[in-house]
Image: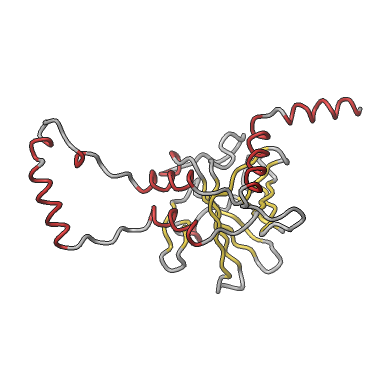
Amino acid sequence: MTGNRTARLGRVRKDPAYIRVALGVVLAFCAGDGPLLGEAPALRLRAIVVGAGATEGPFTIELLRWPTEAERSPLLAALSAPPPAPPAAAAAADSAAGRGGRAGRGGRGGRGGASPPNPLARLTAAVKAAPTLGFIWRDGVTGYSIKYAWRTPSTHGGTERIVLIIDRQLGVHAPGWPPASGAAADAEFTLIEIRVDAKGAGEGKTSLTTNIVADEVDQTLALEGYPSSPVLLKVTR
């Protein structure tokens, strides 16, 4: 019996996902991104999937620390509306576009011919560049790196609002998992918005089925139309 357990443990430790997450934990501590040994994580939650046919989970959400404002800013800026250009700058841009007209008609082209990255591409790049703040574990093996975290007590019934972004699509390969739709179908990451009460019980919704927006009031990324979004996770402490 002991030999069987040892063999299974050996196979788990050779799993690429296990190795990737274990290495991430080591690097996070070496870089000073995590708590000191023996310290409790900044946030720990459990989540199970709800919905017909879903078999993924349960998940353990473990945040090592909350990010600084400087670490969150690039992700928020990726979706925030850019400020309008000053009239002089706009006129100069129009003039430059006119001078480059020959390139636009099939000439050799220039730097002005490239389209700027769309918001989803900007956010994807910002997520990849962000430090790892913690992990979401499934069965203690498969892990997702948390790249963004934010929270605030809500004014609605004493509910706490938590927003996380992980580096991959949550449960994308799991049997019965709801397929991503809309812009999220092409996203390499997942935003998870959670609402929990004072006892730590609540729900979680994700960007797999709902668009991501910049909440300019609370200065965070969030789900568009959270109240009407489908619930995917049941959350507890």
Is 45 situated left or right of 187 in this image?
right
- The relative height of residue 7 versus residue 54 in the rendered view (above or below) is above
Q: Nearer the viewer, residue 51 or 48?
A: 48
Q: Position of residue 161 (x, y in %)?
A: 57, 64
**Residue 206, position as x, y percentages in the image:** 53, 50
| Residue at image location 39% in from the left, 56% down from the top | 77
Q: Residue at x 68, y 55 (%)?
A: 35
- Quadrant where the image shows the C terminus: bottom right
Q: Does 171 sit left or right of 84 as displayed?
A: right
Residue 230 position in % (x across, y down): 53, 52
Residue 12, image quadrant: top right
Residue found at x 71% / y 66%: 199
In this rendering, the answer to whether 158 lies above or below 181 is: below
Quadrant (top left, top right, bottom left, bottom right) of the N terminus? top right
Question: What kind of colouring is applied to the model shown?
Answer: secondary structure
Residue 102 placement: quadrant:
top left
Q: Does 102 sit above or below residue 201?
A: above
Query: Who is closer to the viewer here, 87 or 1?
Result: 87
* Side (left or right) of 210 relative to 175: left
Identity of the residue furthest to the right in this view: 1
